[in-house]
Amino acid sequence: MKILLVEDEPALRAAIVDCLRQGGYLVEVAPTYEVAYEKIKLYQYDCVLVDLTLPDGNGLDVVRTLKADNSAAGVLIISARGALDDKLEGLHLGADDYLVKPFHLSELNARLTAIIRRRQFRGQHHLAFRDLVVWPDETRVLVRGEVLTLTRKEYDLLLYLLASPRRVLTKESIAEHLWGDEADAADSFDFLYTHFKNLRRKLQEKGADNYIQTIYGIGYRLQAE
Amino acid sequence: MKLLTRTNRYYLLLTTALFALGGVVLYFSLNRALRSEVDEQLLAQQQALALSWHPAPPGLGSAGDSLQVSRRPLPGGLREVARYDAQEQEMVPYRELSFPVRRGGATYWLTVRKSLLETDDLLLVVLSVMLAVLGGLLLSLALLTRWLTRRLWAPFQRTLGELRGYELHRRGPLALPATPVDEFTELNQALTQMSARLAADYRSLKEFTENAAHETQTPLAIMQAQLEQLAQDDTLQPASAALVGELYGTTRRLSRLHRALTLLSKIENEQFTQAVPLQLHQVLAERTEQLRDRLAARDLDLRVELTSGPTLLMDASLADSLVHNLLQNALKHNQRGGFVWVTLHAGALEVANTGPAIAGDPSRFFERFRKHNAASDSPGLGLSIVRHICQLYGFTLSYDFAPAGSVHTLRVDFGQKTA
């Protein structure tokens, strides 16, 4: 999977590149509009992550250029501008999603996975991890071929973990993914704990033990054998 | 009171005083002049009579009413008396003069008199004319005021109208025209300059808010991303990992706090100007749906009563924020096994919840950074945001606590703002 990251802030760029490479993506970077324009004209990408405020231009023009060229690349806007208007304009131009800074890298991963899945396989795609297979379009989860029945929130939680396997996910990012801005309530981590407990128990009942690891003080991780 | 009415009041007071004073002076001087004229006539008569008067033969009576003859001595000199006048049928003031005349060895006392009735009539005429002039003056002043208000003050009224309809965030500075009156032109110039300064201040404040909003989020985004990458490090000691986790949580808190403050100042600066008609019950239904999980976890009973919710002219994100913060508050300060009752009807939205009684002045709950529990993670801006949104749209926000059952109720009255 080839990704182009258009972001002018070096430190943020480095962290995002680091995260995406750990996730197995091929990442190229463009710190300016000019470089970005050149790259999208020369190469094909599976997805372009674009910041809106660039030193020499507007990120929305990158989106416009991609759409004018009928590019197959997915577009994810990352911006500090959280106003509804900016969001609507970006989506109207044909961007697939819009993420407001500061964001969780694991949330970025989840959105990116969703965009690529939708674009490349027209939805006919499953996620697999160890003995676990998930068909997102049918909302079906199988453990060694057996159907695993989950609640809506447990399913969302599992899908979020599967988007960043082997990666430590902070409890804040998981809570915000599940409950949006309701996650700032003091008790949201308690529920998260309850949901994880239930998910672990259900996985265990189907013989999928030790899939979810708790990282003390930070969060959770879907761990390899 | 209008300025012209006020000016006129003083003007009239002065005029009336002057007229009264003039009347008194005129009355006394006229009175004096007329009386001395009468006295002169009486003295002239005395001189003529002293030379030519002869006693009439007895039985012929006195020669006319104005002359009285007496043999008894009378006090001499001029004096004023009231006598009955048969013609006027009333007591009439007279001026009379008595003096002795010797004729044929005998002394006769003659009295001549003149009626003062004409003199009094004259005074009356003078005073009535003065009163009539005063009345006329009053009437013409009133008419002049009306005309002046309509004509001279027209530019002032225009300026006032412009100011009343002036909205800083909709338009730039005021452009008030020059007028034929110097004072009004100066006023208009001063107002135009002031509004230009205000518009500049507003612009820079808006820019600052926007810059603060964007530029602060970038370093926060870097911090958060780097901390998240640091958390991936397998060699991290548990104690350090816990610190990283703490730092990560704090970064999120800072970011949320910043967002809430930015929202507050944007509301205060009235930067939300895109009001659209929206159905509050839809917002409410979405938000309560998202809360199901948390309600269930705390055994809270949620009852939502939506009877034909109002259509409000509001910014969509503010409507969402209003509902969200009211519900958050009802949840946050609730107790296990309690309830949240939401009632929405055409005129008001009411959120009632159980919860421990709160000490302190209820009006201060809406202040910024007001926390019931100091250890709480939440910055305590929720109700402050609610209050600001209510102020922006002219809604009335009220709080009520019923000790029976320990029920807190927050009520938002929409007033006339419904579309």
Image: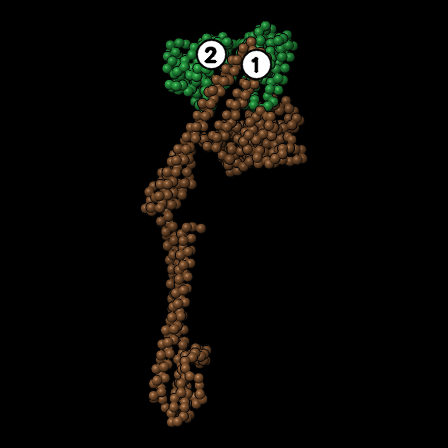
Nearer-the-camera pick, B265 or A177: B265
Tell me if B308 is positioned left or right of B5 in this view.
right
Measured Cα–Cα span from mark 1 to mark 2:
24 Å
Which of the 4 image quarters holds residue A33? Answer: top left
- Residue B395 visible in the displayed image: yes
- Residue B348 visible in the displayed image: no
**x%, y% of residue B355?**
64, 30
Mark 1 neighbour density, 10 Å: few (under 14) some (14–19) many (20 or more): few
Q: Which mark is residue B77?
A: none
Q: At 37% across and 76% down in the image, what residue appears? A: B36
Q: Are marks 1 and 2 in contact (CB under 8 Å)?
A: no
Chain ID, mark 2:
A
* Residue marked by disc 2: A17
Q: At 54% across and 21% down in the image, what residue appears? A: B250
Chain ID, mark 1:
B
Nearer-the-camera pick, A169 or B305: A169
* Residue marked by disc 1: B240
**x%, y% of residue B338?**
65, 28
Secondary structure, mark 1, is: helix
Give the residue type at disc 2: Val
**x%, y% of residue A36?**
39, 14
Q: Specify the chain shown as brown.
A: B
Q: Specify the chain shown as green.
A: A
